Image: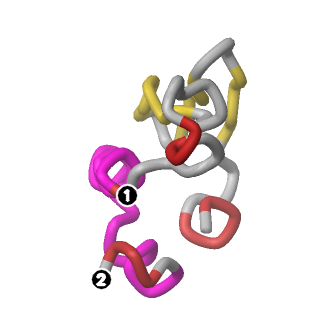
Amino acid sequence: MLEKCAPGHQRVETKHHWVIRYQGTTYRRLPKGQHSKQQSLRGDVNSFHVRAMCRRLGILECAKQELEQLR
């Protein structure tokens, strides 16, 4: 989704999060997902975080077309 909606973005991996930079805007707290203590939450990123990132980066409308969870 980021490749299509935010071409030229940068992803920086930290211990527990991704830092996403696009057109001078930064979203610092996109969780990786696999560090949760609850087994059921490992590997998944809550759509709340994805929607907040898309809103912050200004790509929400494009992301809604790409990800069904955001509709």
Rendered image quadrant of residue 33: top right
Q: Which residue shows up at 68% across the image and 37% down it? A: 10
Q: Amino acid at mark 1?
A: Ser
Residue situated furthest front in the rendering:
39
What secondary structure is marked by label 1? helix
Type of the residue with mark 2: Arg
Q: Residues within 10 Å of mark 2 (few under 14, many from 20)?
A: few
Name the residue tied to disc 2.
71
Q: Is residue 40 left or right of residue 12?
A: left
Judge by depth and name the residue closer to the eye, 6 or 41.
41
User: Where does the image place residue 22, in percent across and percent down from the top left?
Assistant: 53, 42
Q: CA distance from mark 2 to mark 1?
A: 11 Å
Please give the name of the residue rendered at 69% of the width and 63% of the height, measured from the top-left corner.
Answer: 3
Q: Find residue 20 and report its horizontal and vertical position in percent.
A: 56, 35
Q: Assign the N terminus to one quadrant of the image.
A: bottom right
The reply to whether the magenta stretch includes residue 30 is no
Left or right of 44? Residue 29 is left
Stretch of the chain drawn in magenta: 48-66
Q: Which residue is mark 1?
A: 47
Residue 67 shows which numbered tag?
none
The prevailing secondary structure element of the residues shown in magenta is helix
Using the image, determine if residue 60 lies above or below residue 39: below
Q: Earlier in the sequence, mark 2 or mark 1?
A: 1
Describe residue 46's horizontal placement relative to residue 9 as left or right.
Answer: left
Report which quarter residue 69 is drawn in. Answer: bottom left
- Assign a secondary structure to mark 2: loop
User: Residue 5, relative to residue 9: is it above or below?
Assistant: below
Q: Residue at 71%, 23% (x, y): give it.
A: 13
